[in-house]
Every structure is written in C-alpha cells, then in structure tokens.
C-alpha cells in the first residue's frame, strides 16, 4: 500500500525549490518535465514566467540572479531547448551570476541510444558552469538541489546545470526534509585589513575599482569608506550601479570606451584597490592598463573566488573575501594620516562630469541629448537594461546610475539581453520603472519576449536604436577592411508597427525634439512600449564617426 506522504520526483523537486526560497522561475514548457509542470500547478509560492524562447528564459533567470543575489531558476526541455538556453548560461558564467538551469532529459532506459533530443549535458555544459550533473534517482533530489544552491552562490557565483530524466520525475518517493540554504561568503582577515590600511596610508595616487556589492548596505559601506578616505571610486565594466553616480567620489567606469583621462589615472596610480572584479579583458582595456603578471601599481585584489586571485595579475595583497563583507570591514577603517590625493579626487570627478557632457553627432537625432534628458527624467530606482552593440556606449557614458540594482547588462557582451532582462526586472519589481535599450540587430535576437511582457502586463519601455546594420561589426570592418562592407547591412521591419502587433505601444522617433513627448506617451500608455529611434548610420560612437574611422584606416 502506497504511503500517504509519497511524492513524485517532480513534486519533490518543487518542494525543494520552495524550501530554498524560490519565488520566481522562467521556462519554456517541454514534455520532458511535465511532472514538474504538474507540481507547479499546485504551488502558491512560485511565480512562473512562460517565455517564448529558451535563450530569453535563461537571460531572465540571469537577470533575476543579478538583482537578488539568489540563484535565478530556469527550466527548459531537452536537446534544442537546452542548447537554446546556452547563451544565458554563458552570460551567467562570465558575469558571475548565481543561476540553476534544470533541463529535461530522456528516460533512463533510453540513454546511449541517441534517443529523441538526447544530449549528455555534463559534456555540453561542463566547461561553462560550476557544476553539471544528472539526477538519476528521485530520492536524491533534495541532495542534488541543495548542493546546486550552495554551489551557485558560494565563492565566485555562477551557473549550475541539472539534468532531469523524465521517468525519474514520475517515480514515487518518500520525501526527506531539507533546511533553507544560506549563501556562504568568505570574510577578510583582520591582518589583511590592517595591511590594506597601511598601503593606503603610504599611497599618493590611490584608485578604487569596484565590481560587486550592489545592495543598499554594501553601497552605503562603500560610500562611507570613500568619504572617510576621500578616495576616487571607479566602477568596472557594466557594474556602474555599485555606487551612486552622483556621488562626488565617483569618477566613471573602466570599460569599453573608457574616458582617456580615467585610463591614464589607472595606469599612473600607485595603489589600485580592486573589490569584487576579476579585472577581465573589458575592464583592463584588453589587458593594457596593468602589466602582466606583475603590475607597476601596487594591487590589492579583493575577490570571493580564490581561483581568480593571481590568475592573471600578481597582487601585492590578495584578499579572498566577498565584496559585501570586505566593504563592511573597510567602512570601519579610519584614516590615520593626511590624504595627499584629495585634490586629484576632485579633478577626477570634474573629468567624469566633462566626459558625460554629450557631444554633437551626425544626423537629426542626438542620442547623447536623449540620454541626458532621461537621466534627469527617470527616478533613481529605474532599472536600465541593455544587450550589446555600439548603442550601449551612449547608455554607459551619459546615463547616471543612482539606485542599487539599476544596471542589468551582460559583461559577456551578449546581444539580445536587454528585452528579457527588462521582463524579469519588471516581473520582480512592478513598482520600479524599467527601461531597456537595444540596437536593431540586438532586439531581433530576443525581441519576441515583448510578447511575454504583454502577456503578463509588464509596462517596460524599450528604446530601440536603429541604424540599419550590425554597427559594432561594421565599425571594426571599416577599421580593418575599409569600404569592403560584407554581411553587416540589415533590412529591418517597422519596429513600432511590430510592437503594436504584439499589443504593445509603438512609436517611431526621427528627431531629438520628438523624443520627450514620445517617451511620455509611452509612459502614460500603461502598456509595454517600444520607441524606435532612427539614428544616422555615420554616428557609430559618441567620439568618432564611421566616416572618420574609414578615413583613418585608408590613410594607414
């Protein structure tokens, strides 16, 4: 006789997710995990977002992980479902985002036959994730799921993939209880903090670079530390919301298209305090700002993943600690000497403000002016999302991030991220404005998630910058092979009409002076909205036109 408390594998899995505090998950349904979908029917704790493509679902899970610090949960089906989700997994890996991807799998009795849509997910995802495994016994679901939560959040956060054979999910088992997991973060030692204070006291040209710690508490600790020591603070690539950009100690972001004056400060600093950043290719301007393996600057590297310390750059002082506990300790440090860099901090701030004054670009639509207007119009808690492309240079340079968790952008440089990230952000925080930026090429990669926004009545605003080409690639093409245009032109739909076909608000903007009223109409519509901004193709970056890039290339 069956015991009354027996559960299917699918029910036990959902029970475990609820125990570990999951309140949202993102999915594209599949027959390989019907038992989980059936269990979710009875769940009152988990809100399910049904997406239009697995790549969008995985990117939404990544966005959730970025905003909450808890693993974003994604369910996809086997074979093409899993491979479609791989871009989101790669983003989570390079962006150090906690995420768990659950993948339906063929029945256990069909393994090694190349059954319908069969893939060995450990081999496919293994090099990309922190842990890839398959749950072959339903009674081990609590063990595997609990481990997945700890693995995804401990040390350097990242993605985990768990494969779920469909027949295993139908097995009946007696549930075993688990406790809610608590993320584990390493803390700095007292002697390390003392050594850091000593290095700061000896410095003349220090610079702080921060890439993590976006909670209100961590941001407050960073601000307290920066103010006490009057330190210039720069954010690393696409982590500008680690500090209020209106703060007098914020001096800009170190990433693609870095302010040359800030890059010079990085190179000439005698002490670099790097907190929560790997110092990857984008942040280091192609590994040119610091010498490898031993930087000229004294380097204090604070990072949660011990394997990253000394991986590329040999630090003067390595501190294996999470950004939040490190900032908590730094906030308690009191300066014991004069701060000879105080005037340099003021100058660095002035350089940043000058850098964020928009220049004039070719054409009737001035994107810098529009970003300048938005930074005054939007409230501090607005979440700004974007994917990849040259249009992002305007967003990162001219917008100012003021609130915590207000920047959702992939450091991996993945296109197609902005729209699904905006859907996830608005689903999570209906009280916060959410604006997504996309290029014409970028939008078409996951623009179908606008239908998801309509389905769940999520009034995001998408600002689509249309220049009729894959702009970043065209820029590199003209730089390296001038006038030999190949495979970068795009013939686009009427994006505003496409948005209206989805049931969203859509409008086209061709002149700068049209934008303000168009934005207000989109805002007041109460619907998901898309504003198509038609920009002159020659306006390829804020600093240089496509014509100028071509001319310089031909002169070489």
Image: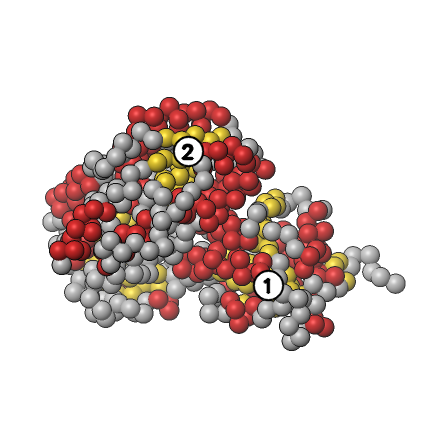
Instruction: State the residue at coordinates (69%, 63%).
Output: 166
The residue beneath circle 2 is 531
The residue beneath circle 1 is 79
Mark 1 packing: few (<14 Cα in 10 Å), some, or many (20+)?
some
Instruction: State the residue at coordinates (29%, 49%).
Output: 235
In-image side of 236 versus 555 (left or right): right
Q: Secondary structure at mark 1?
A: loop
Query: Could you tell me residue 524's position as x and y percent?
Result: 46, 24
Instruction: State the residue at coordinates (26%, 67%).
Output: 313
In-image side of 79 versus 424 (left or right): right
User: Which image quarter holds the N terminus?
Assistant: bottom right
In-image side of 142 versus 285 (left or right): right
Query: Could you tell me residue 364's position as x and y percent?
Result: 27, 31
Q: Quadrant of residue 201?
A: bottom left
Q: Secondary structure at mark 2?
A: strand
Query: Could you tell me residue 245's position as x and y percent?
Result: 29, 40
Q: Quadrant of residue 464?
A: top left
Q: Is residue 471 above or below residue 503?
A: below
Question: Disc 1 to disc 2, how far (Cα)?
Answer: 36 Å
**Furthest residue to the bottom?**
112
């Amino acid at each position: 006789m069956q015991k009354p408390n027996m559960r299917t594998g699918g029910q036990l899995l959902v029970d475990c997710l609820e125990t570990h505090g999951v309140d949202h998950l993102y999915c594209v349904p599949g027959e390989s995990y019907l038992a989980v979908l059936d269990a979710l029917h009875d769940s009152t704790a988990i809100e399910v977002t049904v997406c239009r493509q697995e790549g969008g679902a995985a990117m939404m899970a990544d966005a959730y992980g970025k905003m909450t610090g808890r693993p974003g949960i994604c369910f996809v089906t086997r074979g093409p479902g899993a491979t479609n989700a791989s871009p989101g997994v790669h983003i989570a890996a390079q962006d150090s985002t906690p995420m768990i991807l659950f993948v339906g799998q063929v029945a256990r009795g069909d393994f090694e036959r190349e059954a319908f849509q069969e893939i060995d997910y450990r081999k496919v995802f293994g090099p990309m994730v922190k842990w890839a495994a398959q749950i072959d016994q339903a009674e081990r679901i609590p063990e595997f799921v609990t481990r997945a939560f700890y693995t995804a959040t401990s040390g350097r956060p990242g993605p985990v993939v768990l494969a779920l054979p469909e027949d295993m999910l139908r097995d009946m088992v007696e549930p075993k209880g688990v406790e809610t997991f608590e993320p584990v973060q390493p803390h700095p030692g007292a002697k390390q903090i003392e050594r850091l204070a000593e290095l700061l006291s000896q410095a003349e040209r220090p610079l702080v670079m921060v890439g993590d710690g976006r909670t209100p508490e961590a941001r407050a600790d960073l601000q307290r530390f920066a103010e006490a020591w009057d330190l210039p603070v720069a954010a690393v690539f696409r982590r500008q919301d680690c500090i209020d950009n209106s703060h007098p100690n914020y001096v800009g972001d170190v990433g693609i298209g870095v302010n040359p004056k800030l890059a010079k400060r990085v190179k000439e600093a005698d002490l670099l305090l790097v907190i929560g950043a790997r110092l990857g290719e984008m942040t280091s301007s192609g590994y040119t700002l610091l010498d490898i393996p031993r930087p000229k600057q004294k380097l204090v590297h604070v990072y949660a993943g011990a394997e990253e310390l000394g991986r590329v750059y040999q630090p003067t002082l390595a501190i294996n600690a999470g950004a939040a506990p490190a900032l908590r300790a730094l906030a308690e440090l009191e300066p014991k000497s004069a701060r000879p860099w105080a005037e340099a901090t003021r100058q660095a701030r002035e350089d940043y403000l000058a850098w964020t004054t928009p220049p004039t670009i070719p054409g009737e639509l001035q994107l810098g002016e529009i970003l300048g207007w938005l930074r005054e119009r939007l409230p501090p808690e607005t979440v700004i999302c974007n994917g990849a492309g040259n249009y992002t240079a305007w967003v990162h340079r001219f917008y100012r991030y003021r609130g915590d968790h207000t920047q959702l952008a992939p450091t991996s440089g993945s296109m197609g991220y902005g729209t699904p990230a905006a859907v996830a952000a608005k689903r999570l925080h209906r009280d916060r404005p959410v604006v997504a930026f996309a290029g014409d090429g970028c939008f078409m990669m996951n623009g179908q998630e606008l239908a998801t926004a309509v389905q769940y009545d999520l009034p995001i605003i998408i600002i689509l910058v249309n220049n009729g080409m894959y702009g970043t690639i065209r820029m590199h093409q003209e730089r390296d092979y001038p006038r030999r245009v190949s495979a970068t032109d795009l013939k686009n739909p009427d994006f505003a009409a496409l948005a209206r076909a989805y049931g969203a608000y859509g409008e086209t903007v061709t002149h700068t002076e049209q934008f303000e009223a168009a934005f207000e109409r989109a805002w007041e519509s109460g619907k998901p909205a898309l504003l198509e901004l038609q920009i002159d193709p020659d306006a390829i970056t804020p600093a240089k036109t496509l014509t100028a890039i071509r001319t310089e290339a031909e002169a070489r």
